[in-house]
């Protein structure tokens, strides 16, 4: 929760009832908020009266905000990472420039755009451009090489 200094303690008195909910997620949120309002006597009283399940306490103590990191994926659903090489799967008109990025163009060392998992940045024709991930596919480098072995049998003279 942001702006903790602007919490209105009177508004949060509803936590007296919500802490008793049978839903663990509601108990966790209530417990976290009550802990932030410990300067209020009613919040201290409520914290003193409850005995939450150990799972609820561990969940409330967890500092993870539950925000999942954004995952950039190409047109085929492959996860893209910083520095990957991708190939354009269709011609793209580049806004603000006088060229079209052609299908099959390799974009090396891409940069992932923070805050938008549908965009990447890369260099095409010596210009940095923003590319939508639905128009690229990841290039797999270092594929295992399959070798053909000839069977040198007694009857095979080739």
Image: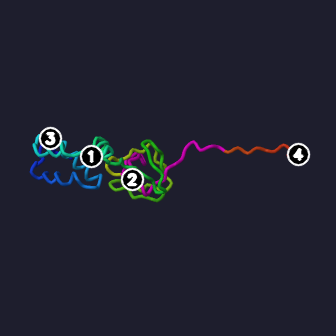
Ranked by sequence position, the earlier of labels 4 and 1 is 1
Work out how far the residue at label 4 is from the one at label 1, CA to CA, in angstroms. Answer: 81 Å
Please state the horizontal and vertical placement of residue 158, each as a whole percent of the image.
Answer: 85, 46
* Nearer to the camera, 41 or 50: 50
Q: Is residue 136 magenta?
A: yes
Q: Is residue 33 magenta?
A: no
Ranked by sequence position, the earlier of labels 1 and 3 is 3
The label number, if any, that marks residue 38 in the structure image:
3
* Nearer to the camera, 63 or 69: 63
Q: Going by the image, does 56 lie left or right of 45?
A: right
**In the picture, residue 60 is in which quadrant?**
top left
The crowd level at tag 2 (other Cα within 10 Å; few <14, some 14-19, many 20+) is many
Residue at 51% x, 54% y is: 104
Circle 4 residue: 157
Q: Secondary structure at mark 2?
A: strand
Per the rendered image, the range of residues in magenta is 117-145
* Nearer to the camera, 103 or 82: 82
Ranked by sequence position, the earlier of labels 4 and 3 is 3
Circle 2 residue: 131
For the residues carrying marks 4 and 3, which lies nearer the camera in this image? 3
Circle 1 residue: 52
For the residues carrying marks 1 and 3, which lies nearer the camera in this image? 1
**In the picture, residue 135 is in which quadrant?**
bottom left
Please state the horizontal and vertical placement of residue 154, each as a whole percent of the image.
Answer: 90, 44
Ranked by sequence position, the earlier of labels 1 and 2 is 1
The crowd level at tag 3 (other Cα within 10 Å; few <14, some 14-19, many 20+) is some
The crowd level at tag 4 (other Cα within 10 Å; few <14, some 14-19, many 20+) is few
Work out how far the residue at label 1 is from the one at label 2, CA to CA, in angstroms. Answer: 49 Å
Work out how far the residue at label 1 is from the one at label 3, CA to CA, in angstroms. Answer: 17 Å
């Amino acid at each position: 929760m942001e702006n903790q200094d602007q919490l209105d303690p009177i508004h949060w008195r509803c936590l007296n009832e919500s802490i008793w909910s049978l839903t663990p997620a509601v108990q966790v949120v209530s417990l976290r908020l009550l802990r932030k309002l410990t300067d209020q006597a009613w919040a201290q009283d409520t914290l003193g009266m409850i005995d939450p399940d150990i799972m609820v306490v561990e969940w409330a103590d967890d500092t993870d905000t539950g925000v999942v990191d954004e995952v950039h994926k190409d047109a085929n659903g492959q996860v893209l990472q910083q520095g990957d090489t991708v190939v354009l799967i269709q011609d793209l008109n580049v806004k603000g420039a006088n060229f079209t990025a052609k299908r099959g163009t390799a974009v090396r060392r891409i940069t992932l755009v923070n805050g938008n998992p549908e965009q990447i940045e890369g260099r095409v024709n010596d210009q940095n451009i923003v590319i939508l991930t639905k128009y690229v596919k990841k290039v797999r480098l270092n594929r295992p090489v399959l070798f053909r072995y000839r069977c040198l049998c007694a009857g095979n003279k080739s």
